[in-house]
Image (spheres, helix red, strand yellow):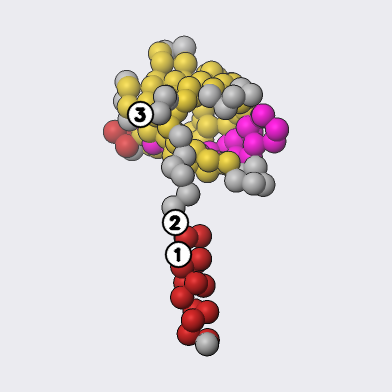
């Protein structure tokens, strides 16, 4: 009888381990005095408000970032690292953003610091959710 109980338990465990739906992809833009950097980002917010994800800006050069921070209500507060492989430098992006009620956009202001900039640089950013393909 113990063996018969094992099969449903294994099936239940397999169903629970199926991959969670993929996090949506957003078009990302950071507007600085010297120009706009664009690419994409994917992130998720867990039940406690912790934000995790990645971002890759591709124009005018590659910038890689590991997103972090916390979402409280519709406000995301963050301080996450970035690298510019071509220049061999890294830094941090600090700021806040506000998510729209429909979760299709998030935008705000940031300060970009670290070895990739001469002085901490103010910028604005926006993430716009891509339509499902």
Residue drawn at 43 percent across, 32 percent down: 25
Residue that carries the numbered disc 1 in the rendered image? 14
Q: State left or right for residue 49 relative to residue 132.
A: right
Quarter of the picture holding the C terminus:
top left
Can residue 118 be seen in this snapshot? no
Disc 2 crowd rating (10 Å Cα; few below 14, some 14-19, many 20+) is: few
Question: Dot 3 corresponds to which residue?
Answer: 133
Query: Does 96 sit above or below residue 71?
Result: above
Q: Is residue 79 visible?
A: yes
Please identify the residue farthest to the bottom as the structure is shown.
1
Q: Magenta part of the protein: which range?
A: 63-80
**Residue occupying image coordinates x 47% and y 16%:** 31
Along the line of sight, the residue nearer the viewer: 54 or 100:
100
Helix, strand or loop status at disc 3: loop
Which numbered disc, 3 or 1, marks the residue that appears first in the sequence? 1
Q: Residues within 10 Å of mark 3 (few under 14, many from 20)?
A: few
Residue at the spot 44% in from the left edge and 56% down from the top edge: 18
CB within 8 Å, label 3 to label 1: no
Residue sitting nearer the eye, 5 or 110: 5
Q: Position of residue 5 (x, y in %)?
A: 52, 79
Taken as a whole, is the magenta stretch helix, strand or loop? strand
Residue at mark 3 to residue at mark 1: CA–CA distance: 28 Å
Q: Which residue is mark 2?
A: 18
- Circle 1 packing at 10 Å, graded few (<14), some (14-19), many (20+), is few
Identify the residue at horizontal 46%, vertical 44% (top origin): 21
State the residue in front, 64 or 4: 4
Q: Position of residue 80 (x, y in %)?
A: 53, 38
Residue 119 placement (x, y as % from top left): 51, 24
SS at mark 2 in the image: loop
């Amino acid at each position: 009888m113990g063996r018969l109980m094992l099969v449903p338990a294994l099936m239940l465990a397999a169903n629970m381990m199926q991959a969670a739906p993929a996090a949506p992809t957003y078009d990302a833009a950071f507007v600085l005095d010297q120009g706009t950097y664009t690419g994409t980002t994917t992130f998720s917010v867990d039940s406690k408000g912790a934000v995790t994800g990645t971002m890759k800006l591709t124009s005018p050069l590659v910038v890689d970032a590991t997103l972090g921070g916390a979402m409280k209500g519709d406000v995301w507060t963050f301080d996450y690292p970035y690298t510019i492989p071509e220049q061999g430098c890294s830094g941090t992006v600090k700021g806040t953003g506000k998510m729209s009620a429909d979760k299709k956009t998030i935008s705000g202001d940031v300060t970009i610091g670290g070895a990739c900039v001469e002085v901490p640089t103010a910028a604005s950013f926006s993430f716009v959710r891509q339509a499902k393909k």
